[in-house]
Image (tube, rainbow, N blue to C red):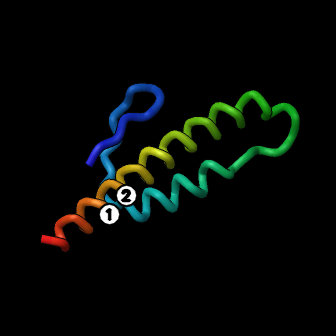
Amino acid sequence: MKITDLNGIEIEVTDLSLAIMQADDYRHYQLSGSANTDYNHPQQVYWEDIYLKLIIIAEQSERGADEQSKI
C-alpha cells in the first residue's frame, strides 16, 4: 500500500504495524535546545500526519476484515 506525505511524495508501506510503531516514535522525537525549535515543529507535524494516515488505513483494514468474517 502507499501513502502520500505532506510534501506530495508517495511512500510505500510494506509492514503496516511496524510503520505505525515507527511513526509513533518519530512524532515524539525532539531535538533539545531553543535553537532547534524551528526544526522540531515541522518534523512533529510531518510525523503526526504520517501516523494518522497509517492509523486510518489500519482501522479501514480492520473494518474490512470484520465485514468479511460476517459473510
Residue 9 occupies quadrant: top left
* Up-down relation of residue 32 to residue 7 (above or below): below
The three-letter code of the residue at mark 1 reads Glu
* Up-down relation of residue 35 to residue 12 (above or below): above
Count how many numbered circles sit on residues in the image. 2
Q: Are marks 2 and 1 in contact (CB under 8 Å)?
A: yes
* Up-down relation of residue 7 to residue 5 (above or below): above
Percent of width and height locating residue 33: 87, 40
Percent of width and height locating residue 4: 37, 35
In the picture as drawn, the residue positioned furthest to the front comes out as 70
Residue 19 occupies quadrant: bottom left
Which label number is shown at residue 41?
Answer: none
- For label 2, the crowd category at 10 Å Cα-Cα, with few meaning under 14, some 14 to 19 and many 20 or more, is some
Q: Mark 1 — residue? A: 62
Observer-side mark, 2 or 1, equals 1
- For label 1, the crowd category at 10 Å Cα-Cα, with few meaning under 14, some 14 to 19 and many 20 or more, is few
Residue 62 horizontal side relative to residue 5, left or right: left
Instruction: Give the quadrant of the C terminus.
Output: bottom left
Percent of width and height locating residue 48: 57, 43
Q: At 21% across and 64% down in the image, what residue appears?
A: 67
* Up-down relation of residue 52 to residue 70 (above or below): above
The three-letter code of the residue at mark 2 reads Ala
Residue 13 horizontal side relative to residue 39, left or right: left
- Please tell me which residue lies in front, 4 or 63: 63
Give the secondary structure at mark 2: helix
Q: At 71% across and 37% down in the image, what residue appears?
A: 40
